Image (cartoon, grey):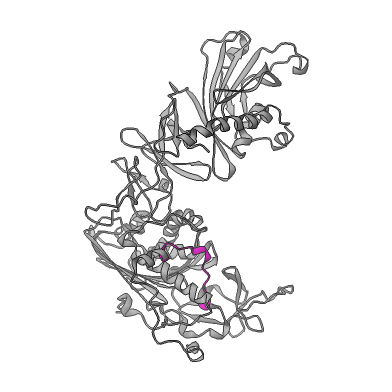
Amino acid sequence: MTEAVWWAVARSEEVSADKPLNVDLGDQPIVLWRNANGVVRALEDRCPHRRAPLSLGCILGSGAIQCGYHGWTYDGETGRLINIPNLKGERKYPPVYKAKPFGVHESGGFVRICTDVKAPPPADDGDALPMSGTATVALQHEQYVDALFDDPSLLISIKGVRFSPYLFAELTEQEGQLMLERSCQWASPHWPAPFSSEFPLSLRIASDAVTGETDLTLLDDEFNLLLHATLAPVPAARGVTQVRWRAVLSPERSGLQSKILGFGTPLKVHENIDGAALRVLKPSASIHASDLREKIAARSAPQDEVA
Amino acid sequence: MLDIFEKPEPKTHDDPITSDPREFASRVNAWMPHDLMLTDAWFPLAHSFAVDKKPVRRAVYSQPFFLWRDANGNVIAAETHPNDMLAATKSEYTDADGRYPVIEKYGYIWGWLGNPDNAAPEHIPSIPYLPEGGGLPRHMLGTVRFDCCAPLSLENLIDLTHADFIHADVVGDEKMDSEKVEVFHDSETITMVRTCVNKSVAPIMKVFGGVRDDVQQVRQVIRIYLRSHAAIAYGRFSPGDNVQLFHPCVPETRDRTRLDYAMNTSNVKKTNPFRYIMPKASYKVSRQDSSMTSPQSPRYMRPEKRKDLHSPLDEAGQKYRVLMLALAERQANGDYAYRDNVSADCSDVIGYDAK
């Protein structure tokens, strides 16, 4: 895995200055919290003293985090130990007394972390999309992204929209992203997809080749934007994938079915996956995904060596 | 004791707590508590009241113990249930009839796990404030469990700074003028004495024990009998009543611990609710401990490149690790002898005054 990869391990509203939040990046547990100025901090969720999770501790007024087991207290930015309360008086601790810090970047309503604390920050996302949620799915990360390419209906629902098995555009790589465009229909009674000559909707799926962070864009047949969403699947413990998502509906939507999108929740990210359907889902678009990922990795490898 | 006659040993042994700080640190950081399995020890398997004619089942390192009383009231400890007609295996830990050595003392049934020939009453730990014949009222006895391996549970206990954070609502927080930790050990025991000056009063003593002051002087002693995985937790509080807890941590499996505790509060006036409430605090306190030791436990199952960090307050925990590893190493080399007497009265060591 490349070092300077930023993973969206939380939504902004999930991270507070009141209570630490435990998240994972694969098998790596991480604790997130905000200091008094609202700046997000990220440390390994493991006190280097006796390996207790720091997320079971508390956030002090200074913005430092205190382990709930023996009170060891750490600076959020550097991870340096700053206090052992039971050792009375001022003490200086050697630099090795620290919890592992992570690079943190918050934008667009997502909190992203990088295992390389010195990594340059990623580009800003702009404003946070108003609708959001977190879904925890018992499916491995790469399988999740592949299923998104092959049949999004197993993972998400868009109100009144049916994803067809047909693509407007095959999976390709564009600037490090894997992109495809799927033909969609309204869910109202209609001529079945295999016999339809026209499709009124298209869903563009643009996915980061490494993180699988995906932009979804639903367009009508006049290229009007109906829905824009970001799905950020992150590998978590035990092969589980945690998906944080944000979405916005276009305020101007013409046509009855487009307007119905605005009633209730337009996007649902499923927690439970139909295993029987997933098992027989034939790999189609995703077959090319692994080739494209390898191509991107091969292209970036020499650059890493230089760096 | 017999071992000494059978296998003459040099009179002096190297103290496993080496004076070389590097070597000491390397032993401390080689701590893999899940890999430890100490035998030739008495384990307090059950409260006496829990064993009657119908067999009850216990385990030490998954090794089954079935306990029941015969017609004369004597306890029998067997490897298989009397109704188990299919049991085909018999371990090296029992005699020809599949029976373990067993002793009833201090209100507990103690089962011997190890070579039955080495079982001797003098290897039962000394617990000065428990009546040898048992008989404490039931409200002072109870069972709780820890979702972790037993040595981690005992390491938790012997570093009492943890109590200021995870049991603050029961025994008081870290606010005090000063704190001193002293550690004593031999090859079979480790004793930690913590003296706190003007410590914030334990809420349980304030609410139920009639203590009106805001601060109290505290002297807490933890003494661990290493092989038996059993600890004495003795606290003197002024003002306040002394706390007399027997805290065994039986390793039922490598990652789960059983604690049949005895909190002798007969020193507290019968009219003081503390006498009845304090033993029940174990139900709350044990879950608080498990909240930390349960996530800790899997993080000690595999070798870990990064060393744990330590503070001067961790002296007892560090020495506990080294002493346990030393015992395990000796046993791995076939040396099961007790070099120190665990049954000698330890009242002086823990500062217990029977009056």
Locate residue B96: give its quadrant. Answer: bottom right
Q: Residue at x 63, y 74 (%)?
A: B54
Q: Nearer the viewer, residue A287 or A144?
A: A287
Figure quadrant of the C terminus of chain B: bottom left
Q: Residue at x 25, y 52 (%)?
A: A92
Q: Nearer the viewer, residue A24 or B252?
A: A24
Locate residue A102: give its quadrant. Answer: top left
Q: Nearer the viewer, residue B179 or A211?
A: A211
Magenta segment range?
Answer: B27-41
Q: Is residue A95 above or below residue B215?
A: above
Q: Is residue B76 left or right of residue B140?
A: right
Q: Nearer the viewer, residue A131 or A306?
A: A306
**Residue A218 falls inside the magenta stretch:** no
Image coords of residue B70 (percent x, y): 61, 82
Image coords of residue B53 (percent x, y): 61, 77
Q: Is residue A66 above or below residue A180?
A: below
| Residue B173 visible here | yes
Image coords of residue B227 (percent x, y): 47, 74
Image coords of residue A141 (percent x, y): 59, 37
Helix, strand or loop for the magenta stretch, by majority: loop
Q: Is residue A234 left or right of residue A182?
A: left
**Residue B33 falls inside the magenta stretch:** yes
